Image (cartoon, rainbow, N blue to C red):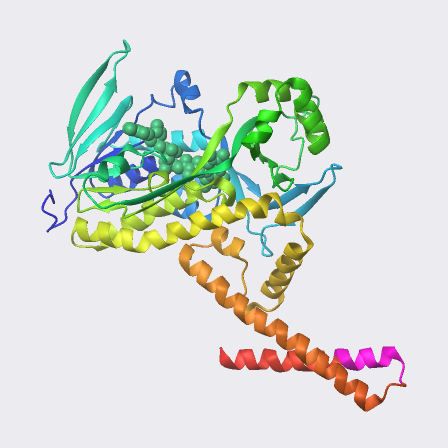
Amino acid sequence: GSSDGTVYEPSKVAIIGAGPVGALAALYFAKGGWQVTVYELRGDLRNPDNRSLNFTKSINLAISERGINGLRTVDPELTESILEEAIPMHGRMIHDKRGKQSSQKYDVHNRFIRSIDRGKLNERLLDELENLTNVELKFNHNLKQLSLEKGEAIFERKLSNGAYENVRVEADLFVGADGAHSQTRRQMMKYVRLNYSQEYIDSLWCEFQMPPHPVTGEFQLDPNHLHIWPRQTFMFIALPNQDKSFTCTLFMPESMFKDIVGPEALLEFFNKEFPDVVGLIGEDRLIADYLKNQKLPLISVKCNPYHYKNRCVILGDAAHAMVPFYGQGMNCGFEDVRVLWEHIANTLTISEALENYTAERHNDCIVINDLAMNNYVEMRASVTSTSYLMKKWFQEFLYNWFPFFGVRTLYSMISFSNIRYSEVVKRVKRQERVLGVFGRVVVVGGCLGAGYATWRKGWYRDGLEVLMKWREEVVRVQGMVVREVMARR
Ligand code: FAD
């Protein structure tokens, strides 16, 4: 093994957590020739008896380029077959209070995100792992303690008779993919000066199911959109499922949930805020889901570093749980795995690989964590504001018609590229500076041109002619700026 961190060779890795990120990490290590054991707190989610155990996670989620690239890099065939079951979402469908729908495309070049069943994706990864001879899956194992200098872990194993026993495990490397409340992270804090912060936002989320149309059996809304009912301080969203239903989520401040006590108050609230939803879900189901389903919190976690020597590294939500408003949580976790593996494959020692991983990845994870937080405001409020729509239109107009400007929207670079998150934000800032200067030049040039034209023509000419001249001047100055910008590129 590589216990002294000097010469790296594939050895024994223990992966903690068999969620999407842990399962993908296991696949990378297994294909890289490591001896892999995956330890998961819960029972096997492929066993129908255990499905309800995964109640704290959304049923479906949006997967986009970074997540797909993380999968594709390790197994292109598996990726294709997983994506066959995903539903393309080309844009947001905004529902107003009168039930009017308006579509906002995500990308001028028709790129899209996909709605995918989180459980099925996880199952496919576990199936794949089970077929590999160098992987062992251990369910009902709860990580209790890590002795990182010794390379030892203690798990509490739940037996079929309900009793518990302690299991001692040895490994060269521990990979923590055990989610937002990571025990691996907590244990690592004993060994390294790990800075850590967490924040619960005020909103909770609650899920509803919108069945297929009772007569036709078809989707009740356009399946190729992510549906949003933005209402400033709260919102309702819906993502399509393969079986032609939609999984809907209500995000709302805790105090508002508390105010809605019985079925009557619930119907009154929905009829007022989301009148079209009541008919689509049906009153009975709406009430049943609301009363039955948990109102769950949303946490944002930041920490640094992500590793300890050559012994331990944390990935996915364990390292950077984020609020779900950019649809990047799992995508970012899959990208973590790809980036970690790049370092492991290209570095001589594991300690160096892990150190480089933290150094590269931390900035990127902080950036997307913050963007996700900001997007909460964008999704529930800004998408309806005129200035937001004008800015989006202007950026897309430039992206579409003046590709040499290199303008791309933030959303498109986050969701449809693999450019580092931190680089995306730098590019956007640069872009906004240039566009700001460009905009000011156009306005100032226009005013000067107008003054000039008015002076030359005298005040007696009719307004229309002055305006025409004004326009010509604007076009002329604009042309100059474009030539100037092109000359500098
Ligand atoms: P988890 O999925 O939390 O898995 C951790 C695993 O570790 C679990 O199986 C758990 O049982 C196990 N575990 C925990 N403790 C222990 C222990 N002590 N010992 C052993 N095992 C342990 N992301 C997107 O990319 N797109 C979206 O559209 C999106 N929408 C979301 C909507 C909502 C409402 C929420 C809440 C999240 C959303 N996310 C989305 C985020 C996404 O769900 C997470 O980022 C993703 O599940 C993280 O995967 P993970 O494997 O790191 O952690």
Give me the residue at 10% from left, 51% from top.
6
In the picture, which quadrant includes the N terminus? top left
Count numbered badges in the picture: 0
Give 168 or 396, whichever is nearer the viewer: 168
Q: Is residue 230 magenta?
A: no
Is there any visible trace of residue 191 in the rendered image?
yes
Q: Which residues are magenta?
A: 461-471
Q: Is residue 352 left or right of residue 290?
A: left
Q: Is residue 177 left or right of residue 111?
A: left
Residue 446 drawn at (x, y percent): 71, 78
Q: Does any portion of residue 210 appear in the rendered image?
A: no
Q: Is residue 209 left or right of residue 269?
A: left
Q: Is residue 467 magenta?
A: yes
Q: What is the chief secondary structure element of the magenta stretch?
A: helix
**Which picture quadrant has residue 456?**
bottom right
Q: Is residue 99 above or below residue 162?
A: below
Residue 402 place in picture, x, y as percent: 60, 69
> In the image shown, does 298 or 416 lie closer to the viewer?
298
Q: Is residue 203 above or below residue 8?
A: above
Q: Residue at x 54, y 61 (%)?
A: 408
- Residue at image position (74%, 36%) is 99
